[in-house]
Amino acid sequence: MAPAIDFAATRPTHVRWTVLGCITLVTILTYLDRLNLSIAAKYIQDELSLSTQTLGWVLSAFLLGYAAFQIPGGWAGDRFGPKRVLTIAIVLWSAFTALTALAPSLFLTRWIGVVGTLLLARFLVGAGEAATAPNGNKIIGNWVGSAHRGFGSSFNILGVGIGGAITPPLIAWLMQRYGWRASFYVAGLAGLGVALIWHVIVSDSPENHPRVNAQELAWIQASRGALRSERAGTARTPWGKMISSRSVWGLLLGYFCQGYPIYFYHTWFFLYLVRERHLSITEGSFWGSTPYLAIIALAPLGGLFSDSASRLLGKRSGRRIAVCAGMFSSAVLLWMGSATRNNTAAILMLAAGGGLNMFAATTYWATCIDLTTRFTGSLSGLMNTFGNLGGWVSPVATAYIATHWGWNRALDWAAAVSIACGIFFLLVRADENLDGAG
């Protein structure tokens, strides 16, 4: 009698999809903790008697910490392992999120005041969250093959869309029912739960994950290639080689330009709808979620498009076409949307423009892996530093242009910066290899 065949054992497991889902979950959490203060701002401002200018400084403290710790966060992932670094980061920023609610009564207020304590808490939330994108991208590089890096990177971007869409109604409901402090406690507690899920489910690579069977591991290795066998931390990040690379400068300058228009949606889009488009608060809250819904739909498509174009035309041309298609289309929709009088048509075009921005962003992250699989965390952190510097400039420049020349000109300028994003990426050669000592 022939031995029974265990067909289940011959099929590959699908742990990689669970790991990618965890990356999306962590990104959703970052937007829950990133946007909660802006939603609670009115209640905090009224209770603590903060001026609008002071509140602006508190809101910007997050971005300062986030930008400042991108490179250290990515470097730490390359040196000590992305799972460990991100687990610690989630716990820390979740604790500081919860402490934001206690800031007015903390002992630190004796020395730096209530505003200083709020500033410090938000800076530390940003510093903790800075490790997310570089280390998530590092894990994507370890778990996803070369032919699927664009789609893999879209799981990081997907969390931006989901988090941006669900955070406003969730935080608003919590505040109305339990008060603004409760929303920060709940967000902090949710972070501890996510940290536990991340620690239990994720590993740095499929080679050291207990639930990956031989079939799935063979599939991943065949599409990805073998990882370096050296221990984390034994190789120095080749900063000199990176900084002297034309491709890296194309990434940095291009991602600076990508950050500028997308932060219009994060900061001014709601007020634009209310002030310029004359929507009610309720209408603005509803339509304000449309860019994030567009990101949910278009980010995965951007990754698939980038991978398909790379297979057909090679990495260099395929990645360039994907970025240019997304950013140039986004620019056109920004320009058309700002000039369209009909509110529904205009908002849908502007929302699609935000989605197409992130359609292109997936390729930027995939290209960090293309250029260096050994030091993806460091390069991703460096690139995202520039992206957030562009985001830091965006709300200030948008307000200045809108005040002096009107909202149409402010959006036209965002469209022009989007075009520059695509042009800079033409400097990038995604088939270049930056791995090695330097």
Image: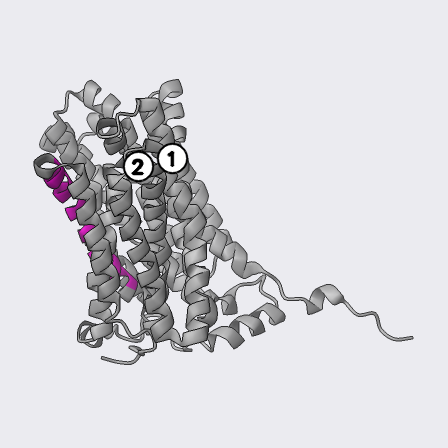
Identify the mark nearer the N-term, 1 or 2. Answer: 2
**Residue 427 lies in quadrant:** bottom left
| Residue 26's disc number | none
- Majority secondary structure of the magenta segment? helix
76 displayed left or right of 58: right
**Residue 229 lies in quadrant:** bottom left
Residue indicated by mark 2? 35
Residue indicated by mark 1? 167
Observer able to see residue 28: no
Q: Position of residue 304 (x, y in %)?
A: 46, 61
**Magenta stretch encompasses residue 318:** no
Q: Amino acid at mark 1?
A: Thr
Q: Are marks 1 and 2 in contact (CB under 8 Å)?
A: yes
The residue drawn where x is 83% and y is 69% is: 4
**What's the CA distance linking mark 1 and mark 2?**
7 Å
Could you tell me how many numbered marks the image carries?
2
| Viewport quadrant of the C terminus | bottom left
- Relative to 319, does residue 345 appear above or below in the rendering? above
- Considering depth in this image, is 316 or 162 the residue closer to the camera? 316
Q: Position of residue 213 (x, y in %)?
A: 61, 67
Secondary-structure class at tag 1 = helix
Query: Which span is picked out in magenta?
Result: 380-402
